[in-house]
Image (cartoon, helix red, strand yellow):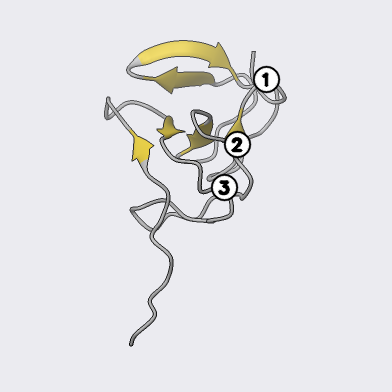
Amino acid sequence: MQLGRPKGRRFLLLDSGDNVVTLLDEKSGIQCLDNGMMINSNIPFGHKISLHPIAMGEAIIKYGVKIGVATSFIEKGEHVHVHNCK
Protein backbone atom coordinates (compact mmCIF):
# COMPACT_ATOMS: atom_id res chain seq x y z
CA MET A 1 0.00 0.00 0.00
CA GLN A 2 1.31 3.43 -0.93
CA LEU A 3 0.22 6.61 0.80
CA GLY A 4 0.35 9.85 -1.19
CA ARG A 5 -0.17 13.42 -0.15
CA PRO A 6 -3.78 14.38 0.55
CA LYS A 7 -5.65 15.62 -2.48
CA GLY A 8 -5.83 19.41 -2.56
CA ARG A 9 -8.97 21.44 -2.05
CA ARG A 10 -11.37 21.86 -4.94
CA PHE A 11 -12.01 25.38 -6.15
CA LEU A 12 -13.88 27.38 -8.78
CA LEU A 13 -12.18 29.83 -11.14
CA LEU A 14 -14.46 31.18 -13.87
CA ASP A 15 -12.48 34.03 -15.43
CA SER A 16 -8.76 34.34 -16.20
CA GLY A 17 -8.84 37.88 -14.74
CA ASP A 18 -10.01 36.69 -11.30
CA ASN A 19 -7.61 37.25 -8.40
CA VAL A 20 -9.56 34.97 -6.03
CA VAL A 21 -11.05 31.48 -6.25
CA THR A 22 -13.98 30.00 -4.33
CA LEU A 23 -13.48 26.83 -2.27
CA LEU A 24 -15.86 23.99 -3.13
CA ASP A 25 -15.29 21.49 -0.31
CA GLU A 26 -15.29 21.13 3.48
CA LYS A 27 -11.64 19.92 3.77
CA SER A 28 -10.51 22.90 5.86
CA GLY A 29 -7.46 21.08 7.25
CA ILE A 30 -5.80 20.71 3.84
CA GLN A 31 -3.34 23.51 3.04
CA CYS A 32 -3.20 23.34 -0.76
CA LEU A 33 -5.48 23.60 -3.76
CA ASP A 34 -5.90 20.83 -6.35
CA ASN A 35 -3.37 22.68 -8.52
CA GLY A 36 -0.74 22.45 -5.73
CA MET A 37 -0.85 26.10 -4.63
CA MET A 38 -0.35 26.46 -0.87
CA ILE A 39 -3.16 28.13 1.11
CA ASN A 40 -3.98 28.92 4.73
CA SER A 41 -5.85 26.22 6.65
CA ASN A 42 -9.28 26.37 8.28
CA ILE A 43 -10.97 28.28 5.46
CA PRO A 44 -14.65 27.32 5.16
CA PHE A 45 -16.52 25.99 2.14
CA GLY A 46 -17.67 28.76 -0.21
CA HIS A 47 -15.10 31.29 0.95
CA LYS A 48 -12.47 32.97 -1.24
CA ILE A 49 -8.69 32.46 -1.48
CA SER A 50 -6.30 34.94 -3.12
CA LEU A 51 -4.43 33.64 -6.18
CA HIS A 52 -1.60 36.16 -5.79
CA PRO A 53 -0.70 39.03 -3.46
CA ILE A 54 -3.37 41.75 -3.49
CA ALA A 55 -2.38 45.29 -2.49
CA MET A 56 -4.44 47.41 -0.13
CA GLY A 57 -6.97 49.29 -2.29
CA GLU A 58 -6.77 46.78 -5.16
CA ALA A 59 -10.02 45.40 -6.56
CA ILE A 60 -11.14 41.90 -5.58
CA ILE A 61 -12.21 40.20 -8.84
CA LYS A 62 -14.43 37.09 -8.75
CA TYR A 63 -16.21 35.60 -11.79
CA GLY A 64 -14.81 38.48 -13.87
CA VAL A 65 -16.57 41.10 -11.72
CA LYS A 66 -15.23 43.53 -9.11
CA ILE A 67 -16.85 42.42 -5.85
CA GLY A 68 -14.91 44.63 -3.46
CA VAL A 69 -11.63 46.27 -2.52
CA ALA A 70 -8.81 44.99 -0.30
CA THR A 71 -8.74 46.90 3.00
CA SER A 72 -5.27 45.53 3.84
CA PHE A 73 -2.48 43.67 2.06
CA ILE A 74 -3.57 40.09 1.24
CA GLU A 75 -0.95 37.34 0.84
CA LYS A 76 -1.15 34.70 -1.89
CA GLY A 77 -3.22 31.79 -0.54
CA GLU A 78 -4.85 33.89 2.19
CA HIS A 79 -8.53 33.84 3.13
CA VAL A 80 -10.35 36.79 1.50
CA HIS A 81 -13.41 37.81 3.48
CA VAL A 82 -14.91 40.72 5.47
CA HIS A 83 -11.78 41.03 7.65
CA ASN A 84 -9.64 42.18 4.69
CA CYS A 85 -12.02 43.46 2.01
CA LYS A 86 -15.16 45.54 1.68
Q: What percent of the width, then of the height, locates residue 4? A: 38, 76
- Label 2 residue SS: strand
How far apart in space, not on screen, are marks 3 and 1 (Cα)?
A: 18 Å
Q: Secondary structure at mark 3?
A: loop
The residue sitting at 27% across, 25% down in the picture is 15
Location of residue 19 by image quarter: top left
Question: Could you tell me residue 40's position as x and y percent?
Answer: 60, 49
**Disc 1 from disc 2: Cα separation:** 10 Å
Write down the residue under mark 3. Answer: 28
Side (left or right) of 21 relative to 14: right
Quarter of the image where one finds residue 5:
bottom left
Q: Earlier in the sequence, mark 3 or mark 2?
A: 3
Q: Amino acid at mark 3?
A: Ser
Q: Label 2 crowding class (10 Å Cα cut-off): few <14, some 14-19, many 20+? A: many
Disc 1 on helix, strand or loop? loop
Q: In percent of the image, x 37 and y 39: which residue is there? A: 11
- As displayed, is residue 39 above or below residue 55? below
3D distance between C-alphas at marks 3 and 2: 11 Å
| Label 3 CA crowd tier, 10 Å (few <14, some 14–19, many 20+) | some
Residue 25 vs 7, above or below: the answer is above
Residue depicted at x 72% and y 24%: 83
Residue holding disc 1: 82
Q: Amino acid at mark 2?
A: His
